[in-house]
Image (cartoon, grey):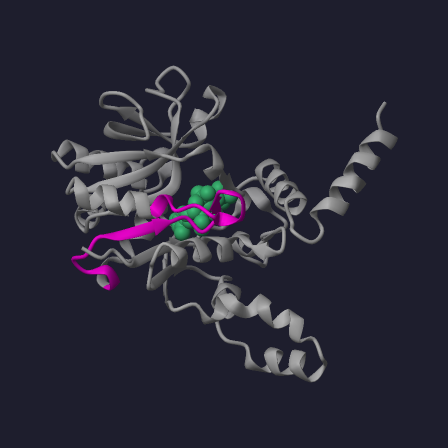
Amino acid sequence: MDINIAVVPVAGLGTRLLPATKSQPKEMLPVGRKPVVQYVVEEMTRVGMQRILFITGPGKTSIENHFDLNPELIQLLRETGKEELLAEFDFERKPVQYFYTRQRQLLGLGHAVSCAESFVGDQPFVVALGDSIIGLHAQSDVVRRMTDCFVRNQAAAVIAFEPVPLSDVANYGIALPKNGTGDVFEVADVIEKPGVQEAPSNLAIAARYVFAPSIFAAIKRTRPGKGGEIQLTDAIRLILQDGGKVYGIRLSDAERRFDIGNFEAYFRAFVEFALADEKRGASLRQFVEQWLNDHRS
Ligand code: UTP
């Protein structure tokens, strides 16, 4: 079975990043040299996705423009002798087709995924959150491991997880593993944003999923949950209650999730990516070290 559709929800308002997100999507904020969503798309194309459906909303047209061809700009760079910059447009020519549909009411992530139903039909598909990079420079192949696990186990869903400090469990969907928490484990339950006391583990959903199309029926039955939103995690619970098999795949140490949804995480991600930049990372490191030395109290 070839799983080659990725659904990328990017419709959220990004209120935690205001005013930066007042008139531009948070998914277009740069981390190092590229906008966040470009890392997501590059990760998807590397693991063989051929069709990418963005779930968009008002104010998100710059995402469509970013993945479109821009012949005028290419022409201008040629004419002005800046050929070396043409390599920066390689991502435009990846063998992938882009599609867009709007989430017309912001009712939550589960609702955003349900907007993909008529596009996806009766095939399994990947969901990759447009505001989360997996691994420095998105070198992760976790989605390939997830699709392999999905096929091998005839699963209803496979979810990427990463351990988080207990103080952070209230920000994520958290897994109750069935038995053991190795690299691959069966999931008994998932709880959206639990308090520290109710958290069944510290394994947090890490922005990547593979679903059988049965998720759509589950989302339709899902009532508004935390924050009054139709939560994807609650739909996954329904799948589990119906007897569907759900597996978890742990991210490796090299596959840390960079969720840029709040300023603290965004600043850290930017600094880490900039310090790892091939051309400018070393001089930035010198600058930062010097600055910290000069400003030590
Ligand atoms: P978040 O809940 O982190 O995004 O969703 P948000 O709603 O933009 O955040 P704040 O709280 O207002 O700052 C994670 C991903 O799911 C998408 C977002 O665009 C983001 O990429 N999303 C979320 C949707 O597409 N639709 C929704 O209704 C909610």
Residue at image coords 24%, 41%: 149
Q: How many marks?
A: 0
State which region is magenta: 119-143
In the displayed structure, would residue 6 be above or below residue 81? above
Residue 39 in magenta stretch: no
Q: Position of residue 260 (x, y in %)?
A: 54, 43
Residue at image coords 28%, 24%: 176
Of residues 192 and 223, the one nearer the viewer is 192
Of residues 190 and 177, the one nearer the viewer is 177
Of residues 267 and 198, the one nearer the viewer is 267
Residue that lies at the very extreme toward the right in this rendered image: 294
In the displayed structure, would residue 68 be above or below residue 221? below
From where the camera sits, is residue 66 visible? no
Q: Position of residue 285 (x, y in %)?
A: 74, 40
Q: Position of residue 201 (x, y in %)?
A: 35, 21
Q: Position of residue 254 (x, y in %)?
A: 48, 37
Residue 45 horizontal side relative to residue 151, left or right: right
Quadrant of residue 80 within the rendered picture? bottom right
Give the quarter of the figure containing the N terminus. bottom left
Residue at image coords 21%, 50%: 216
Quadrant of residue 252 within the rendered picture? top left
Give the quarter of the figure containing the C terminus. top right
Quadrant of residue 197 within the rendered picture? top left
From where the camera sits, is residue 167 visible? yes
Residue that lies at the very extreme toward the left in this rendered image: 243
Residue 125 in magenta stretch: yes
Residue 288 horizontal side relative to residue 130, left or right: right
Residue 116 horizontal side relative to residue 56, left or right: left
Residue at image coords 33%, 64%: 51
